[in-house]
Amino acid sequence: MEDKNVEITPENTSTTEDTPLKIEKKKRTVVNVLSLKKELDTFKEESKQRDTKIFSALETLLNKDEVNPEPVTEEPAETESEVIVLTKQQRDIFEYYFDPKDGFKANYDINLNVFTIEVPEKFSNVTDAHKALYKQDLRSKKVDPNNILGSMKAWCILVKQNLKYERRIQLKD
């Protein structure tokens, strides 16, 4: 039967039977769990106090900013309309497939690279739930940045086919 705390070294062992074996016992380290728990609790408390000081300092800085807000400069309305207006080539592609007299509108957002066709209610084929939720029928597509005009043309063709719209047919209002 071996003891787990006993270490046998080659110096202590002998091959002859007449000399006794020397066995050294290691000391066990005793850990008091309650003292560890107490140390952990004090560490948590110190950390919590430090965090509270940091957060209170940040809150005071934020409150000072709210008292003296910097004026926000608004971009002129022309910038937004420039982003949405179609170029002549884009307008030609759109008007080849859709007649603006029927109420179709289109825009192209340069920043998002999104082409949107606004379908008038009389041509819209969306569900009643969609109409109730969104109040309008917008058909948007992110266009290929390497082929913007080709992507717009393909999107106009798809929307036209989905609506079963014929530009040549004049509708009475």
Image (cartoon, helix red, strand yellow):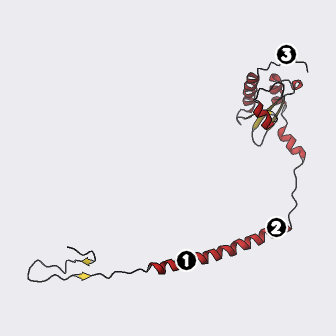
Could you tell me if residue 138 is visible in this image?
Answer: no
Residue underneath mark 3:
169
Quarter of the picture holding the C terminus: top right
Task: Tell me which numbered mark, 2 or 3, is placed earlier along the sequence.
Answer: 2
The amino acid on which the numbered mark 3 sits, given as a three-letter code, is: Ile
Q: Residue 161: x and y, percent?
A: 74, 22
* Residue at figure coordinates x 85%, y 23% from the top left: 99
Q: Secondary structure at mark 1?
A: helix
The quarter holding residue 154 reads top right
Q: Secondary structure at mark 3?
A: loop
The amino acid on which the numbered mark 2 sits, given as a three-letter code, is: Asp
User: Is 133 left, or right, of 75 in this rendering?
Assistant: left
CA separation, marks 3 and 1?
A: 81 Å
CA separation, marks 2 and 3?
A: 61 Å
Residue underneath mark 2:
65
Q: Which of the labelled discs sits on residue 41, or is there none? A: 1
Q: Residue 64: x and y, percent?
A: 82, 70
Q: Secondary structure at mark 2?
A: helix
The amino acid on which the numbered mark 1 sits, given as a three-letter code, is: Asp
Could you tell me if residue 48 is visible in this image?
Answer: yes
Q: Which of the labelled discs sits on residue 125, or is there none? A: none
Q: Residue 132: x and y, percent?
A: 80, 35
Quarter of the picture holding the N terminus: bottom left
Mark closer to the observer (3, 1): 1
Label 1 neighbour load within 10 Å: few <14, some 14-19, many 20+:
few
Q: Are marks 3 and 1 in contact (CB under 8 Å)?
A: no
Q: Residue 104: x and y, percent?
A: 84, 28
Q: Is residue 4 above or below residue 137?
A: below
